[in-house]
């Protein structure tokens, strides 16, 4: 029978519930349990695909084409197993399902209410994941902070599941903050007491408290928390600030979070978690022999979460190369009005980021021009690739007015154009080319060498693509297509063989980089940046 672990957060947001959930799942996975993690988000959007990155950070895309919360990226990076549609549910989706059912007449004669209809749908979604995946343990992270109006139905669904299945099958882990008051030189437990009170009001007694803190928790503090919050003191877990999120599984191991969880779930395990591969990764991460500086040209740089997976992919690829990757965020709009050589000085490589809309495009194109001419390693992702194509069309092919029709709908030379099957789509939610598609690589290309094989699959999220009518002209003047989607003959990768490292991809490699499997293209790009640095 599948066991359930709910992770809630109290006191404040941004405590890192996703990282704690992913770390716990990692420890359980390494004890040979089959685990998955799900995120319940309390907002009304059906998915975060329609949210501005400034609002919610990056939109993470799964293999099956779900546009999801960025926490799913952490789950995949830690567990090295893919997530799916079912791993991210929003209040919008729950209500949409219930309202559609109501229209179909599924509740004829009944008043449709939050309890039981909405809570039943929440419970169904949590349990469906378990059924479909044959999991031993499903971890469910409830977004938001306990006490928020929006998350009440989730807490109620969790309370009902605990009542129906018993606490030994449905555990409550509560993550809180223990603030340090420097004037008093004291760690304070009161906010946690209040947060637990909120949970109790929703009918939930937490089984385990995970306490974020800047300073170690003394025995006395743990005892106090245990007494006031009605948990045993062994179940008060310290989560001290770490220098990297990748330390957290080891910190949780030391604090025996996994042991407490298994004990409370009455699950037996003989072996210890095998974290040797993880430790090797950390060893490489923390003992680099080199450092490279990569410029990240984007327009959402104020919020690093907007490029979360790119940052993490550089951490993985850096460790693989035993090289620290310093990512320097550069606002593309700033490049439009400044001296480019000044702004890009001292960088060993440039990545032009994904994005939407016209704002910042000119700066991105200017950056591509500069690195192409200067022989600086370049990596373009999605919009970054489209900018590289436009730049080449203008500067090398001398195509007048060459542009993406996303920016210039009546362009004379639409080298990037709306995909054929997008032309009749007017609805915005979930309608892009989304999810995993095959790509065939050309032998001898940078991509082929990096992957070491000819057929790959990568995830997509876009509406525009390389216009196939221009393929020959590009090839004849030095920019070649090295990856195509075999089913629809779509251009997925372009390269300039004459350049030391010029690679641009229509898909999102950053969504598939994990600790265990750093993404080959990021690894190759970091290596190229390092070679560039060492040779110049
Ligand atoms: N705006 C571009 C498109 O829709 C690129 C999207 C992206 O970078 N994810 O094709």
Image (tube, rainbow, N blue to C red):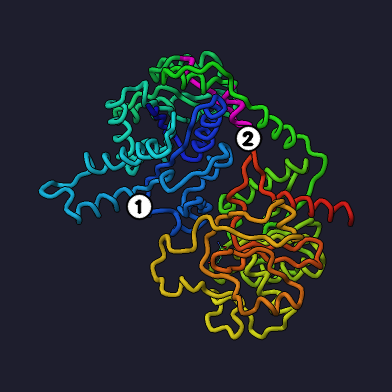
Going from the N terminus, do you reach mark 1 or mark 2 first? 1
Disc 2 marks which residue?
246
Residue drawn 47% across the image and 17% down it: 268
Give percent across and percent down for residue 235. Answer: 47, 18
Tell me which segment is drawn in magenta: 233-253
The kind of secondary structure element at disc 1 is loop
* The disc label shown at residue 44, or none: 1
Residue drawn 46% across the image and 46% down it: 84
| Quarter of the N terminus within the rendering | top left
From the viewer's perspective, is residue 201 above or below residue 75? above
Residue drawn 41% across the image and 71% down it: 425
| Quarter of the C terminus within the rendering | bottom right
* Location of residue 447 (image quadrant): bottom right
Mark 1, other Cα within 10 Å: few <14 / some 14–19 / many ≥20: some
In the current view of this chain or complex, which residue is farthest to the left? 109
Which residue is more in the foreground, 521 or 306?
521
Say left or right for 162 vs 364: left
* Location of residue 41 (image quadrant): top left
From the viewer's perspective, is residue 196 above or below residue 321? above
Q: Can you see residue 196?
A: no
Give percent across and percent down for residue 34. Answer: 49, 31
Which residue is more in the foreground, 27 or 536?
27
Give percent across and percent down for residue 86. Answer: 41, 45
The kind of secondary structure element at disc 2 is helix
From the viewer's perspective, is residue 184 above or below residue 245? above
């Amino acid at each position: 029978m599948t066991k359930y672990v709910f992770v809630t957060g109290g006191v404040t947001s941004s405590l890192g519930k996703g990282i704690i959930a992913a770390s716990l799942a990692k420890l359980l996975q390494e004890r040979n349990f089959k685990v998955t993690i799900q995120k319940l988000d309390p907002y009304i959007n059906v998915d975060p695909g329609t949210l501005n990155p400034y609002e919610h950070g990056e939109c993470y895309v799964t293999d099956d084409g779900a546009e999801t919360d960025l926490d799913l990226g952490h789950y995949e990076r830690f567990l090295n197993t893919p997530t799916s549609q079912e791993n991210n549910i929003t209040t919008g989706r729950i209500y949409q399902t219930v309202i559609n059912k109501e229209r179909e007449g599924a509740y004829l004669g009944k008043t449709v209410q939050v309890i039981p209809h909405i809570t039943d749908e929440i419970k169904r979604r949590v349990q469906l994941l378990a059924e479909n995946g044959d999991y031993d343990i499903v971890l469910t992270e409830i977004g938001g902070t306990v006490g928020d109006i929006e998350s009440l139905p989730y807490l109620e669904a969790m309370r009902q599941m605990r009542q129906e299945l018993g606490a030994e099958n449905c555990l409550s882990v509560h993550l809180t903050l223990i603030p340090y008051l420097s004037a008093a030189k004291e760690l304070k437990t009161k906010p946690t007491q209040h947060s637990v009170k909120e949970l109790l009001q929703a009918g939930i007694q937490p089984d385990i408290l995970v306490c974020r803190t800047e300073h170690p928790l003394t025995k006395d503090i743990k005892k106090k928390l245990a007494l006031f919050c009605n948990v045993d003191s062994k179940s008060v877990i310290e989560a001290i600030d770490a220098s990297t999120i990748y330390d957290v599984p080891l910190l949780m191991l030391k604090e025996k979070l996994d042991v407490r969880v298994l004990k409370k779930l009455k699950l037996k395990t003989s072996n210890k978690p095998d974290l040797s591969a993880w430790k090797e990764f950390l060893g490489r991460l923390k003992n680099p022999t080199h450092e490279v500086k990569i410029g990240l040209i984007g327009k959402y740089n104020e919020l690093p979460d907007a490029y979360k997976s790119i940052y993490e992919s550089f951490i993985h690829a850096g460790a693989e190369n035993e090289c620290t990757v310093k990512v320097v965020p550069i606002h593309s709009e700033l490049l439009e009005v400044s001296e480019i050589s000044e702004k890009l000085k001292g960088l060993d490589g440039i990545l032009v980021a994904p994005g939407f809309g016209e704002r910042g495009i000119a700066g991105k194109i200017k950056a591509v021009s500069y690195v192409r001419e200067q022989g600086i390693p370049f990596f373009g992702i999605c919009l970054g690739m489209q900018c590289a194509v436009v730049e080449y069309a203008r500067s090398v092919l001398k195509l007048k007015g060459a542009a993406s029709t996303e920016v210039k709908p009546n362009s004379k030379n639409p080298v990037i154009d709306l995909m054929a099957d997008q032309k009749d789509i007017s609805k915005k939610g979930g309608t892009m080319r989304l999810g995993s598609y095959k790509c065939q690589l050309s032998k001898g290309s940078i991509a082929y060498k990096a992957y070491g094989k000819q057929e790959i699959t990568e995830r997509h999220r876009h509406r525009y693509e390389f216009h196939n009518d221009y393929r020959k002209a590009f090839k004849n003047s030095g920019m070649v297509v090295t990856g195509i989607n075999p089913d629809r003959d779509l251009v997925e990768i372009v390269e300039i063989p004459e350049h030391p490292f010029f690679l641009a991809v229509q898909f999102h490699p950053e969504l598939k980089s994990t600790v265990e499997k750093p993404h080959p293209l990021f690894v190759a790009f970091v290596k190229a940046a390092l070679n560039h640095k060492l040779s110049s």
